[in-house]
Image (cartoon, helix red, strand yellow):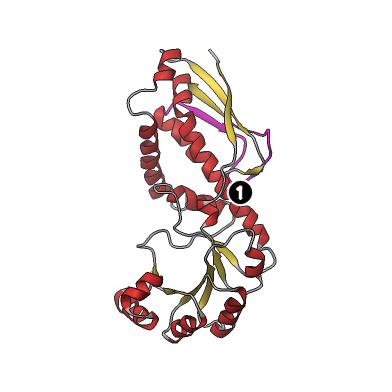
Amino acid sequence: MNNPITERLHADELIKLALSEDITGEDVTTNAVMPEKRLGTADLICKQDGVICGLAVFARTFTLLDDSTEVELFAKDGDEVKRGAHIAKVTGDIRVLLSGERTALNYLQRMSGIATATRAMVKLLDGCKTKLLDTRKTTPNMRVFEKYAVKVGGGGNHRYNLSDGVLLKDNHIGAAGGVAKAIEMARAYAPFVRKIEVEVENLDMCREALGAGADIIMLDNMSADDMAKAVEMIGGRAITEISGNVTAQNIENIKKVGADFVSSGAITHSAPILDLSLKNLHPID
């Protein structure tokens, strides 16, 4: 996705785990109605408007079951699709099509839903400098797919995981004994190439983080007035990020603050799926 080689290998292992979750021994229903291999085809149909994402993962789910499966795509990730659109055709062993259908659709529906929600929120930020980011509030074992979907939807990725960057949150600050002390300890421990981000909840904490040399200051769950005062106080001496219950419903107030970034967990943890279906399965030999 971003790194095609390593992420493909990582994605393959996750898809295999998902398939093994759904098929622990055999697909009893499929084996009952299709005891022998038979070539067939089915159509991927979009059932509501949205942004399609995850087509490669959808296809890979079938080819991991049988590498002779063919998936013909009529759209690409990031395309805005309409209800009734014919997105793809899957051709192969009917047993593979039946057994892989649910897992393939689960990935595609989830990723498309996130891309759709992200695209909608990005559009709400049109005309201001603030850029949308995701968070680590992702489904376990789905992060590589969900963060890719955010990128496809037009958003940006915050840190991928705990090894990816320093972010001092309230409990880190409490453990260290204060904002300045936490920054001092992080600066001493982390490699010099790492930026230090600090989460602050009020103007006093913001002032302390700024004085201690934080590279990025996250304004967490602050009022719009206090966020605006914080951005003015920082005055470009640190990167500014807004976070805390950010949704499409309240983002209009956030636009006026003038921060560099806004991060939203809602685009991953609360995005509804995009309704898609594999239809018209029939033998072709």
x then y, percent, for residue 138: 45, 52
Relative depth, front residue between 94 and 68:
94
Indicate whether 48 appears above or below 98. Answer: below
x then y, percent, for residue 282: 56, 17
Find disc 1 in the rendering and name its residue.
Answer: 116
Residue extending furthest bottom? 211
Task: Assign a secondary structure to mark 1.
Answer: helix
Callout count: 1
x then y, percent, for residue 19: 39, 33
Q: Is residue 168 visible?
A: no
**Residue at 44% across, 20% down:** 95
**Residue 96 sits inside the magenta stretch:** no
Quarter-of-image position of residue 226 = bottom right
Relative horizontal placement of residue 249, taking residue 98 as reference (left or right): right
**Residue 67 sits inside the magenta stretch:** yes
Disc 1 crowd rating (10 Å Cα; few below 14, some 14-19, many 20+) is many
Tell me which amino acid carries mark 1: Thr
Q: Is residue 176 visible?
A: yes
Indicate whether 7 appears above or below 181. Answer: above
Secondary structure character of the magenta stretch overall = loop
The range drawn in magenta is 66-88
Relative depth, front residue between 78 and 142:
142
**Residue at 43% across, 51% down:** 143
x then y, percent, for residue 191: 33, 73
